[in-house]
Amino acid sequence: MFMVPAFFLGVLIGVWRAYKKQGNKLDMLQYGATHGIIFFIIAMFMTIALGWLGWV
């Protein structure tokens, strides 16, 4: 439920951080993909935990 927006938020944050460090387009791609995957995994575990608690 929260995983897709979390992935795109992670991509945006990763691209912004690479841009801030004056990285090229491949750096932005790598940072975006890494942050997106990490945010996706965190959101997945949060969704599972909230489901177990009965909140979702």
Image: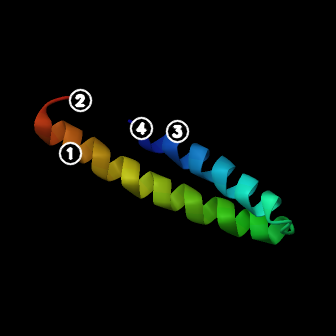
Rendered-image quadrant of the N terminus: top left
- Amino acid type of the residue that numbered disc 4 sits on in the rendered structure: Phe
Name the residue carrying label 3: 5
Question: Which residue is more in the foreground, 11 or 1?
Answer: 11
Disc 2 to disc 4, C-alpha distance: 11 Å
Residue 17: x %, y % from top left: 71, 58
Q: Is residue 53 above or below residue 26?
A: above
Q: What residue does disc 1 label?
A: 49
Q: Residues within 10 Å of mark 2 (few under 14, many from 20)?
A: few
Marks 1 and 3, the one that precedes in the sequence: 3
In the rendered image, residue 44, in percent from the top left (x then y), is placed at 35, 50
Decide which of tag 3 and tag 2 comes sooner along the chain.
3
The answer for how far apart the CA atoms under marks 4 and 3 are is 6 Å
Residue 42 is situated, as x and y percent measured from the top left of the image, at: 38, 54
56 left or right of 24 in image: left
Q: CA distance from mark 1 to mark 4?
A: 12 Å
In the image, which disc is placed on residue 26? none
Residue 56 disc label: 2
Which numbered disc flags the more N-terminal residue, 1 or 4?
Answer: 4
